[in-house]
């Protein structure tokens, strides 16, 4: 269970303060996929950065299970990002000089996954996203955009983190490929009981989620 309570974040700029996240509270269950929808600058990516501990809130709390993330030390925050959260980005963010399998293996290494299990786990994840065989040995430059995003999904889920954060994961893909990526996210969430939050501006993607949350001017609301 992910529990967010009264989360708040303000940035100071030359033009004045920007209230990126305002008093945000919500809960999300294991195995559930949530879509967060909003225009550019609405606070979507800031919220994901806070949940992933890439940035710190000014106030409020984030809990996963019985762990309060605000209580973590610097080392604890690093371990959280490596072991308890998986990131999926619009730009894929794969290591260009590593092949698909090596990108997944690297995530398992960072998460201290047992060494003797890493190879089989990477193979399992790549099979899940349809990239076993020869494609698992290809570097990102020899994979299509959709295939690269499949590798990113395999990497994010590899260490079985309880939380997956996807920031516009279909934004650079064509519609058909994007919907396939969303289906893979739903499948992975169901199989691994992870909570998946997908930031998107695409209503077609959002319609595939279990719940939809809207955000505008930093204010989060539940959508029907």
Image (cartoon, grey):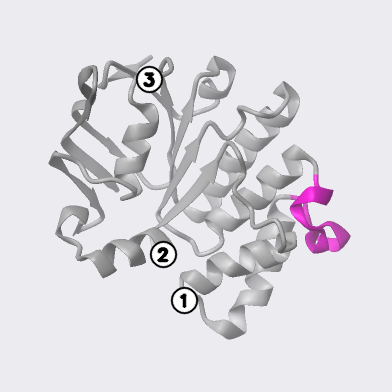
Residue topped by disc 2: 83
Instruction: Give the residue drawn at x 74%, y 38%.
Output: 145
Q: Which segment is the magenta one?
A: 130-143
The answer to whether the residues at label 2 and label 1 have Cβ atoms under 8 Å apart is: yes
Badge 3 or badge 1: first in the primary sequence: 3
Question: What residue is drawn where x is 72% and y is 62%?
Answer: 97
Comes first in the chain, label 3 or label 2 = 3
202 shown above or below 198: above
Q: What kind of element bears circle 3?
A: loop
Q: Which residue is mark 1?
A: 112
Mark 3, other Cα within 10 Å: few <14 / some 14–19 / many ≥20: some
Say if the magenta span includes residue 193: no
Residue 141 within the segment the image draws in magenta: yes
Question: Of tags 3 and 1, which is closer to the observer?
Answer: 3
Q: Is residue 55 above or below residue 36?
A: below
Name the residue carrying label 3.
41
Q: Quadrant of residue 57?
A: top left
Horizontal side of 81 relative to 219 (left or right) equals right
Residue placed furthest toward the front: 14
Q: Position of residue 200 (x, y in %)?
A: 50, 25
């Amino acid at each position: 269970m992910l529990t967010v309570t009264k989360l708040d974040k303000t940035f100071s700029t030359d033009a004045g303060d920007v209230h990126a996240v305002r008093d945000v509270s919500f809960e999300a269950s294991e195995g559930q996929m949530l879509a967060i929808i909003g225009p550019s600058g609405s606070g979507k990516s800031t919220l994901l950065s806070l949940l992933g501990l890439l940035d710190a809130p000014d106030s409020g709390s984030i809990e996963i299970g019985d762990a309060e993330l605000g209580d973590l030390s610097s080392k604890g925050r690093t371990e959280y990002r490596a072991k308890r959260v998986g990131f999926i980005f619009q730009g894929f963010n794969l290591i260009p000089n590593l092949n698909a399998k090596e990108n997944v293996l690297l995530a398992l290494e960072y998460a201290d996954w047992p060494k003797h299990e890493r190879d089989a786990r990477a193979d399992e994840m790549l099979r899940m996203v349809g990239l076993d065989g020869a494609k698992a040995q290809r570097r990102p430059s020899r994979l299509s955009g959709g295939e690269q995003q499949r590798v990113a999904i395999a990497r994010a889920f590899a260490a079985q983190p309880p939380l997956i954060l996807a920031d516009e994961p279909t934004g650079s893909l064509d519609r058909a490929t994007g919907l396939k990526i969303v289906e893979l996210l739903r499948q992975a969430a169901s199989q691994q009981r992870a909570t998946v939050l997908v930031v998107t501006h695409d209503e077609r993607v959002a319609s595939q989620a279990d719940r939809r949350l809207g955000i505008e001017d930093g204010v989060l609301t539940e959508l029907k």
